[in-house]
Amino acid sequence: MKELSQFPGELTFRLMMLDDLPDVMVIEHESFTLPWTREAFRNELTNNHFAKYMMMELNGEPIGYAGMWTIMDEAHVTNIAVREAYRGRKLGERLLDELMRTAAYLGMKRITLEVRVSNSVARNLYEKKGFTPSGIRKGYYSDNHEDALIMWADLPNVESTAGEEGSEQK
Ligand SMILES: CC(C)(COP(=O)(O)OP(=O)(O)OC[C@H]1O[C@@H](n2cnc3c(N)ncnc32)[C@H](O)[C@@H]1OP(=O)(O)O)[C@@H](O)C(=O)NCCC(=O)NCCS
């Protein structure tokens, strides 16, 4: 889909492909202290039937990505990141909107994620989009044993024939 953002230019969203992994690794490394490996992403794209990953591009340049697992009627966000130079311009919000819209379209009723308790930028974003805290995973992050805050949001009912896709069992 195509739409205009506050950033001048054309903002587009599309499925992540294996060819995107070099760009994904750049963004991953500037975004996370425990970055996923290229192999981990490759495995998600090729072996994990539950995984859905999308790229966000500005004027054709990859500037962010997000992913989730769709299991039964619940979406589990695995990661969301925007290139450092493009942060703070509502693009992360647009990316999360798109991920949540896709999850709803696939028949997901709720969406969940984990976030570092210290990551106030992401927590603010999630709260803005309707996520509420529901628990803590103690020492979840292996680099500094920081706690993860578990958050959930309800998704709107969307008329779709694609709902079956998220209802398979492992
Ligand atoms: C988290 C992330 C995706 C947000 O994207 P972004 O483009 O920077 O954020 P946006 O400009 O869309 O802002 C959306 C909301 O996030 C919050 N936010 C953004 N920047 C913020 C800041 N500097 N301080 C506090 N809150 C902030 C606000 O609620 C904001 O809404 P508002 O502008 O109406 O107040 C991005 O900062 C990022 O990639 N961070 C590194 C990776 C990461 O932490 N991912 C989340 C892992 S759980």
Image (cartoon, rainbow, N blue to C red):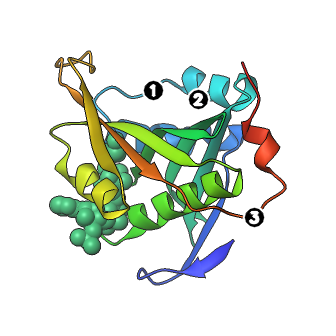
Residue 34 pos. (x, y %): 33, 25
Residue 74 pos. (x, y %): 57, 39
Q: Are marks 1 and 2 in contact (CB under 8 Å)?
A: yes
- Residue type highlighted by circle 2: Phe
Residue 113 pos. (x, y %): 40, 38
Q: Which residue position holds label 2?
A: 41
Q: Quadrant of residue 58?
A: bottom right
For marks 3 and 2, give the CA distance.
30 Å
Which of label 3 and label 1 is nearer to you? Answer: 3
Q: Residue furthest right?
A: 161
Horizontally, is 78 left or right of 168 in the view?
A: left
Horizontally, is 114 left or right of 45 in the view?
A: left
Q: Is residue 165 above or below residue 12?
A: above
- Residue at 70% from the left image edge and 37% from the top image edge: 18
Q: Is there any visible trace of residue 111 in the rendered image?
A: yes
Q: Which residue position holds label 3?
A: 159
Q: Is there any visible trace of residue 149 in the rendered image?
A: no
